[in-house]
Image (cartoon, rainbow, N blue to C red):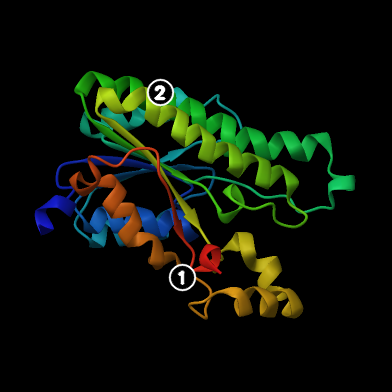
């Protein structure tokens, strides 16, 4: 059974892998045997060290994923790196907090472009190659706000709800091509995106009180879900949005 979760000889592209959830996913995939291509704006030296300490190869591709301009460059770099592309993790994302009455068009477009538009076109470019090789795994990072509305993050909620819908839609089209498209919906994790919430004592206490597990998530808590969805163990799993939330949605 353990062989079902091995990723030996595979190449994974992980966007936004320099810190937080993306870094944890990249390291987990490397520990399972995959070589890692990390794409993003910021250098991923810490991630490189962790991946290489797991005995896997690592490539950083500088790419501003707020637009679709670098999409083909990222995919080409991955193919040139190891000659194959097996896994794409669409983790890069941004959040802008403001009352809905005060959201600017600039902030709305920035969030939707990064969290949804680039995600789709990266998936499209990767899937073109995966379809030719007859196999591939695409893992989108959704959110609890794929199910709920949240507070003061209307653009983020819209983008993550759309990511869930897009995950279903792409699974419907690409499952027959051997491509698994699924998503992980993280709950409240200790990352840069939640720093403002954790710094607000009242809001942090209210969030923690609702999590049945009794704690904020650690990025490492995503490791098992990511490896499962990237591996042969999930070959007949298509179009799911898997919450990893300490029980938040069950409350």
Q: Which mark is residue 218?
A: 1
Decide which of 122, 99 is in the foreground and name it: 99
Q: Residue at x 10, y 57 (%)?
A: 1
Q: Residue at x 69, y 52 (%)?
A: 149
Decide which of 106, 215 is in the foreground and name it: 215
- Rendering coords of residue 49 (x, y %): 33, 60
Decide which of 44, 121 is in the foreground and name it: 121
Q: Quadrant of the C terminus?
A: bottom right
User: Which of marks 2 and 1 precedes in the sequence?
Assistant: 2
Q: Image height check: is 36 above or below 75?
A: below
According to the picture, the residue beneath numbered tag 2 turns out to be: 125
Is residue 63 visible in the rendered structure shown here?
A: yes
Which image quadrant for residue 236? Answer: top left
- Rendering coords of residue 177 (x, y %): 26, 23
Q: Are marks 1 and 2 in contact (CB under 8 Å)?
A: no
Compared across the picture, whether 66 is left or right of 4 comes to: right
Which image quadrant for residue 87? Answer: top left
Q: Residue at x 66, y 36 (%)?
A: 112
Residue at the front extreme of this rendering: 251
Task: Count up the numbered dots.
Answer: 2
Compared across the picture, whether 89 is left or right of 6 comes to: right
Tag 2 secondary structure: helix
Q: Image height check: is 204 above or below 34?
A: below
Q: Which mark is residue 141?
A: none
Please rate how many residues cluster around mark 1, counting C-alpha atoms within 10 Å: few if below 14, some from 14 to 19, many from 20. some
- Rendering coords of residue 201 (x, y %): 73, 80
Separation of disc 1 and disc 2 at Cα?
A: 31 Å
Q: Residue at x 79, y 35 (%)?
A: 106
Residue at the right extreme of this rendering: 101
- Rendering coords of residue 231 (x, y %): 22, 47
């Amino acid at each position: 059974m353990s062989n079902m979760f091995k990723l030996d000889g595979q190449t994974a592209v992980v966007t936004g892998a320099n810190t937080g959830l993306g870094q944890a996913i990249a390291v987990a995939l490397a520990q399972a045997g995959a070589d890692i291509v990390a794409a993003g704006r910021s250098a991923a030296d810490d991630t490189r060290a962790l991946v290489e300490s797991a005995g896997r190869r690592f490539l950083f591709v500088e790419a501003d994923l707020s637009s679709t301009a670098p999409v083909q460059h990222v995919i080409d770099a991955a193919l040139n790196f190891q000659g194959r592309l097996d896994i794409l993790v669409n983790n890069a994302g941004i959040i802008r907090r403001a009352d809905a009455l005060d959201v600017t068009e600039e902030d709305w477009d920035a969030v939707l472009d990064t969290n949804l538009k680039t995600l789709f076109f990266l998936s499209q470019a990767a899937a073109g190659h995966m379809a030719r090789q007859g196999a591939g795994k695409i893992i989108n990072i959704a959110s609890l706000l794929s199910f709920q509305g949240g507070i003061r993050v209307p653009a983020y909620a819209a983008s993550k709800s759309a990511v869930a819908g897009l995950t279903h839609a792409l699974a419907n089209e690409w499952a027959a091509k051997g491509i698994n498209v699924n998503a992980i919906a993280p709950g409240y994790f200790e990352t840069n995106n939640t720093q403002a919430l954790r710094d607000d004592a009242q809001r942090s206490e209210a969030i923690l009180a609702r999590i049945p597990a009794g704690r904020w998530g650690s990025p490492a808590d995503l490791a098992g879900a990511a490896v499962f969805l990237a591996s042969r163990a999930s070959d007949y799993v298509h179009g799911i949005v898997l919450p990893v939330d300490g029980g938040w949605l069950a409350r």
